[in-house]
C-alpha cells in the first residue's frame, strides 16, 4: 500500500489550458497532461529560480519530492516540444 499524498501548497497562475504546435488542430495531436504540482515546481524552480529546498518548503513537501516533480515536469515539457505534442496545463491552480 502506498503512502497517502501530502497536501501541497500551490500558488501559480496558469495563463492558458493548452500549449500546442502552431497550425495543427489539437484534435490531431497527442496530449501530455502537466499536473498542477508539476506546473508549480517548474514555476518555482525554473522561473523564480528558488533553490530546491526553498521551493519544497514553499510547497510544503520534501526536497526529494520537489526534485521528482521538477524532473517529471521538465521531461513532459521537453517531450511535448521535441515531439510536437500538445501540453495540457492544469486549470485548478490559482494565485493565492
Image: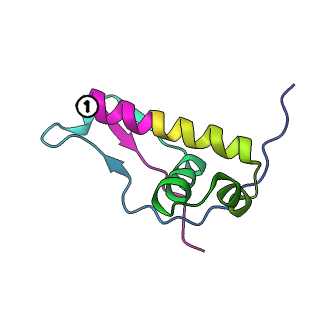
Q: Quadrant of residue 24?
A: top left
Q: Is residue 34 above or below residue 28?
A: below
Q: Residue at x 69, y 63 (%)?
A: 58
Residue that mark 1 sits on: 84
Q: Is residue 95 above or below residue 3?
A: below
Q: Residue at x 63, y 61 (%)?
A: 10
Residue 80 locus on image (x, y percent): 34, 34
Quarter of the picture containing the N terminus is: top right
Q: Quadrant of residue 83?
A: top left
Residue 23 locus on image (x, y percent): 12, 41
**Observer-nearest of 51 and 29:** 51
Q: How is the image coloured?
A: rainbow
Which residue is the extreme one toward the left?
23
Write down the region rendered in magenta. 76-95
Q: Is residue 12 magenta?
A: no
Quarter of the picture containing the C terminus is: bottom right
Residue 63 locus on image (x, y percent): 73, 47
Q: Residue at x 75, y 52 (%)?
A: 61
Q: Is residue 83 magenta?
A: yes
Question: Which type of secondary structure does the marked residue at label 1 adopt?
Answer: loop
- Position of residue 63 in the picture relative to residue 95 (left or right): right
Amino acid at each position: 500500500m502506498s503512502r497517502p499524498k501530502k497536501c501541497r501548497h500551490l500558488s501559480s497562475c496558469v495563463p492558458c489550458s493548452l500549449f500546442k504546435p502552431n497550425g495543427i488542430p489539437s484534435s490531431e495531436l497527442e496530449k501530455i497532461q502537466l499536473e498542477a504540482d508539476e506546473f508549480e515546481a517548474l514555476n518555482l524552480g525554473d522561473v523564480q529560480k528558488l533553490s530546491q529546498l526553498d521551493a519544497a518548503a514553499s510547497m510544503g513537501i520534501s526536497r526529494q519530492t520537489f526534485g521528482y516533480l521538477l524532473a517529471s515536469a521538465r521531461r513532459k515539457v521537453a517531450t511535448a516540444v521535441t515531439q510536437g505534442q500538445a501540453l495540457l496545463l492544469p486549470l485548478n491552480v490559482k494565485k493565492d
